[in-house]
Amino acid sequence: MIIVGGSSSRDLAKELASTLGYTYVQAATTRFPDGECYTRIDNKELNDDVVIVQNTYPDGNLIEMFLLQDAVRRLGAKTITLVIPYFGYARQDRVFKLGEPESARVMTRHLGLDCDHVITVDIHKESVLDYFKCSHQDLKAAGAIAEYFKDKGIDLVLSPDLGAIGRAKDVADRLGLKYDHLQKTRLSGSDVQIAPAVVDCKGKNVLIVDDMISTGGTIIAAAHALREAGAESISVACTHGVFVSNAIERLTGSSLDSILCCNTLENELSHISVAPIIAEALKR
């Protein structure tokens, strides 16, 4: 098997190849002055099963993925597996208003034109993968997050809301801890209280887990509320650190003690690796 690293996921692809003992090939990707993508794989042939590791966010990375699929097929790839650590456009899986596209279906249709298997990590809506005609699976990062925090003295795992409590439970169960979700209670027309729905956080080392952090506003507000409620320390870990609009600066300047994300999106906070769980999936 050969691992091909796209420009968005170089470090993850290298770690994946090293973990599995597979050949690693880095695609040489550049941009023309007008912004168009150029990519090339400097091999005479790829007469093997090929895994492409590349995000489909933002748009330029999606185009690169399309070009990489064509390139590896032309070099003789026997099968093509797409490892998409962060799948862009997974949120719009239906048409809400007349004139809208069904974005998720559009992306899966085009990505599925030349691949045999697809692996994603904590995709926003797992049902999106059913649009693929090839085999597919979504991996959960809870195991990687729990492994990272197993010796960090965490007492309580929280989700930002009830809808995401399954992720908090998964991490907490692996750590042998209690879990809960944050609940907003309106005290007046202008005041809202944010606190764990059931479990008292006073004096506890709290870990908030989520699938994605974009602007960080919800997490910052939650951290402030937990600090006022007596939490000893507050850490946050997410799978996908999108971090737009100076989110990293605002998060690091908040009352949080640590902010971490997985390396599905590579940035200065992506210290939790999902390579082991992807490696296991590829072995299977």
Image (tube, helix red, strand yellow):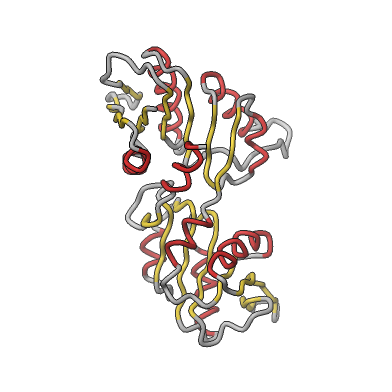
With respect to residue 43, does 27 lie above or below? below
With respect to residue 20, does 205 lie above or below? below
State the image coordinates of residue 118 (x, y, percent, origin top left): 54, 32
The N terminus - image quarter: top left
State the image coordinates of residue 242 (x, y, percent, origin top left): 45, 50
Residue 17, quarter of picture:
top left
State left or right for residue 263 relative to residue 187: left
State the image coordinates of residue 168 (x, y, percent, origin top left): 59, 64
With respect to residue 157, does 170 lie above or below? above
State the image coordinates of residue 44 (x, y, percent, origin top left): 28, 14
Residue at 48% across / 75% down in the picture? 154
Residue at 44% across / 53% down in the picture? 241
Residue at 60% across / 59% down in the picture? 167
Q: Nearer the viewer, residue 115 or 161?
A: 115
State left or right for residue 142 relative to residue 249: right
Residue 10, quarter of picture:
top left
State left or right for residue 125 relative to residue 97: left
Residue at 47% across / 84% down in the picture? 232
With respect to residue 261, does 192 lie above or below? below
Number of marks present in the image shown: 0
Q: Nearer the viewer, residue 98 or 145?
A: 145
State left or right for residue 27 relative to residue 172: left
Q: Nearer the viewer, residue 116 or 63?
A: 116
